[in-house]
Amino acid sequence: MANTSARMLRLLSLLQTHRYWPGSELSDRLEVSPRTLRRDVDRLRELGYPVDASRGVAGGYQLRAGAAMPPLLLDDEEAVAIAVGLRSAAAGAVAGFEETSVRALAKVIQLLPPRLRRRIDALQAVTAPGVFGGGPVLDALTLTTVAMACRGEERLRFDYTPRDGESMRRHVEPHRLVSLGRRWYLVAWDLDRGDWRNFRVDRLTAPAATGARFRPRDLPGGDPVEWLRSRLATIPNRYDVSVVLEADAATVRAVVGHWGSVEELADDRCRLRMGVDDLSWPVMILGVLAVPFTVESPTELRESARRAGENLVRHAA
Amino acid sequence: MANTSARMLRLLSLLQTHRYWPGSELSDRLEVSPRTLRRDVDRLRELGYPVDASRGVAGGYQLRAGAAMPPLLLDDEEAVAIAVGLRSAAAGAVAGFEETSVRALAKVIQLLPPRLRRRIDALQAVTAPGVFGGGPVLDALTLTTVAMACRGEERLRFDYTPRDGESMRRHVEPHRLVSLGRRWYLVAWDLDRGDWRNFRVDRLTAPAATGARFRPRDLPGGDPVEWLRSRLATIPNRYDVSVVLEADAATVRAVVGHWGSVEELADDRCRLRMGVDDLSWPVMILGVLAVPFTVESPTELRESARRAGENLVRHAA
DNA sequence: CGGTAGCGGCCACTTTCTGACCGCAATCCG
DNA sequence: CGGATTGCGGTCAGAAAGTGGCCGCTACCG
């Protein structure tokens, strides 16, 4: 209680909650003499946390940004917000951050007190529900359980239903979670088969870490993403969309965001390319942009767009 | 360096990165004797962090979830992921979490080392770019600067361009940020007018905290959200969309997510209601659902849907 | 100019920390 | 079952640190 370490943490936490603190108030709250407070502040500075101080009548202490990330001291609300934000980022709301997000999420979840965990679970599925065509709905608990087993190097059991086949209990040594093309895969050593396998996380239920730890094996080639990509290459199942639009690139980018690349062809003409599993997403983009367009590929997109358009026209009457 | 507090933090951080740690390895890394390590673990436990230990040949230490949130010790990647996730949540990707997210974001941003801040700023705007019709593009820096001024109780100057009028420099005591209907508002005491005002954050540029602190005034009524709502009630400017769809409610919900309410009318018939500023969003939903529908209101939606449909049909050829 | 508030040296006293040594208690494995 | 491994915690003595009080100094503000 009267411990120095604890006091330092409390001080750091106080400095994180308000921008300015008069020294007297800090020493008050920490129940030490002002002299000791000054020493504590010094200690923080020695640890690399940049605490600014200003003198004079309205003086006080302030925590600036430094070179290293100080320990984040969060209250309940903030912790929940972070978990929720990470969850939606893990679901692909922010392109390119899925994997880091799920790693950070696993860390937060692991530390989260149960009562907060319940609040988060109340939000149910990991996918930000919405228009992200093709993204399967994924249980956040499943994803984080798997992520934690990877990190903790714990064996994992789960039920798995392959695309065509019976559901089966599996027992694996989890290696890495990989997010590829809006889907999550687990790369793992299958203990029953004695070989490396990949599993789509959305086809996986009731994962449970067994508690047994293992020494990670080396994946052939080393890079799980490459390995997975080569395994999946045998079943390509995506459309490569390419459309020329009579609109300026900036407008298109504003609508499409990260989910496609926009190539400027002229002042008000650009080419949009994106890879998708489901054509409804590009159709929507064409719909909302409301500009002339030419479908270059795939031909199926023409058909989808025409059908959607006819449907709209027919019922708008 | 050989400081106890620092070592405790390092220990906590180690315990956060792997699930299990053999005691010998921990004492090794911390460069203390195993006895001291045991004492450090004890200290953590006394501080309330639940460190489990298991004995025997594969024994080790492990940090469980406890009653309080321990300080989060993040590496660069994780910190960036958290900031990015929070930013997208603040932009409304996760309904209902905008305000808490922006508070947490302000805290993280404040602590973030500049090099990481730059990485995040490279991602530019706070809005998850995409289909969220009507959400104005908002600069993350603006939002967090304002949030930090609120938290730090610092006066704020900024340029403000009202809907119809000249841009003007303002000087306020910021009170609260409020997210309402996919927009951010600042509720503040206007120092020039000597009265409470609200400002749309997307119309606000170059915010700068002056460094002068103030004692927060009491907002009449106390609740900033209520206050703002009553102020805005005079300018209603949204469409109230109501559409009957020939589809089962679950399907519609999966597409619409939080952004509307779905009322089940029959097995394959439901009513969708949502409030929007911009009709392109409901049009897209109608497009992607590809089911018969009847627009109940507003009549403008019929026109928009028809135009979008015709455009699709015309160019799909 | 005077008041406020942070800075940091000095000192004496107290408390904590540390490593070493010990026997003990789970747990795992053969 | 018995041995190896690994965590647990008591005790001890010396070393290290933390503490409050005192002081004069400096920056800032009105």
Image: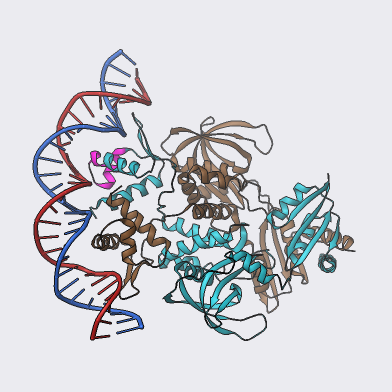
Chain colours: A brown, B cyan, C red, D blue
Asked where in the image residue B220 lies, by quadrant, the reply is: bottom right
* Main secondary structure type of the part rendered in magenta: helix
Tell me which residue sits at (34%, 41%) in the image. Answer: B45
Q: Is residue B317 visible?
A: no
Which of the pair B164/B33 is nearer the observer? B164
Which of the pair D26/B126 is nearer the observer? D26
Q: Is residue B224 above or below residue B25?
A: below
Q: Is residue A162 visible?
A: yes
Location of the C terminus of chain A (image quadrant): bottom right
**Residue B50 as seen in the image, left or right of residue B207:** left
- Point out residue B272 in the picture as x, y percentages from the top left corner: 78, 55
Whether the magenta-drawn stretch holds residue B12 is answered as no
**Bounds of the magenta segment:** B23-36
Q: Is residue C22 above or below residue A137?
A: above
- Point out residue B197 in the picture as x, y percentages from the top left corner: 59, 75
Which of the pair A59/A300 is nearer the observer? A59
Tell me which residue sits at (44%, 48%) in the image. Answer: B69
Tell me which residue sits at (58%, 51%) in the image. Answer: A180
Q: Is residue A148 above or below residue B309?
A: above
- Point out residue A187 in the picture as x, y percentages from the top left corner: 53, 42
